[in-house]
Amino acid sequence: MPLALTSVLTLGVNPLVAFFLGRSRMPLESLAVMPVVNGLIFAFNTAGLTFQEVAITLYSQGRNGYQALRRFAGGLALIISGLVALMAFTPLLDFWLQRVAGLSSALSQFARLPVALIVLLPAITVITCFQRALLVVVRTTRAITWSTGVEVGGIAGVLFALTQWGNWVGAVAAVTAMVVGRLGALVYLLPRTARALALSPPGHS
């Protein structure tokens, strides 16, 4: 049930973001570029989400692989965020936005800042998925649900504050809220993961 509820909460993020985009500054431009930005987020977050399933399988077979999994997670986080940075801060971004995604030159310029803001998001996702994998193995899944609630609540709160009080451009506010929400989930899981490792330390199968 906790894991099923996690999926339900996650599915509610996109309608929530769309709701606030329509009530933000420059709503039409934001609604036009966010599918492209979300596509980039999905493409680079996929590695982290896939790693979660791999980590669950390998870690559940024996805790001796914990250190190797942790090193791999760190390397994967650096590589994926490095690739996003390579795209966000080089001419590759214009090629992707205009030639591949089909945005106009004006919308391409509009999307540059939101894309730059997602650089850290894939790395945060990898670390969060690693935390969740460990909690699944030790059967402490309720914390995963609460972390998802923290993430969704953080996204909603930051979006509301930035669009309604801060008058931020919608797309910039949305990406900022996603990063803050995901980071909040990571921070929430830190003590829970440490407690789970203390109760079931690496090397104990």
Image (cartoon, rainbow, N blue to C red):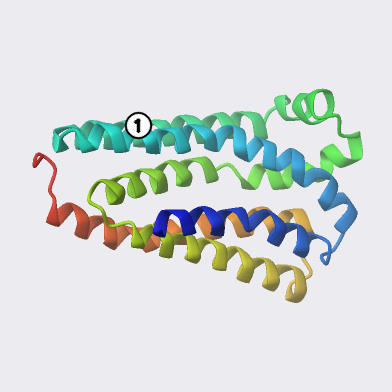
The structure residue drawn at horizontal position 22% and vertical position 50%, both measured from the top left corner, is 138
Image quadrant occupied by the N terminus: bottom left
Give the secondary structure at mark 1.
Answer: helix
Residue extending furthest toward the front:
1
The structure residue drawn at horizontal position 79% and vertical position 31%, both measured from the top left corner, is 97
Q: In this view, does 9 lie to the left or right of 202?
A: right
x and y percent of residue 144 in the render? 39, 57
18 w.r.t. 153: above or below: above
Whether residue 169 is visible, yes or no, is no
Q: Give the camera-side residue of 31 and 123.
A: 31
Q: In which quarter of the image is residue 141?
A: bottom left
Q: Give the camera-side residue of 106 and 7.
A: 7
Q: How crowded is mark 1: few (under 14 residues within 10 Å), some or many (20 or more)?
A: some
The structure residue drawn at horizontal position 63% and vertical position 58%, both measured from the top left corner, is 12
x and y percent of residue 177 in the render? 62, 60
Amino acid type shown at disc 1:
Val
Whether residue 103 is visible, yes or no, is yes
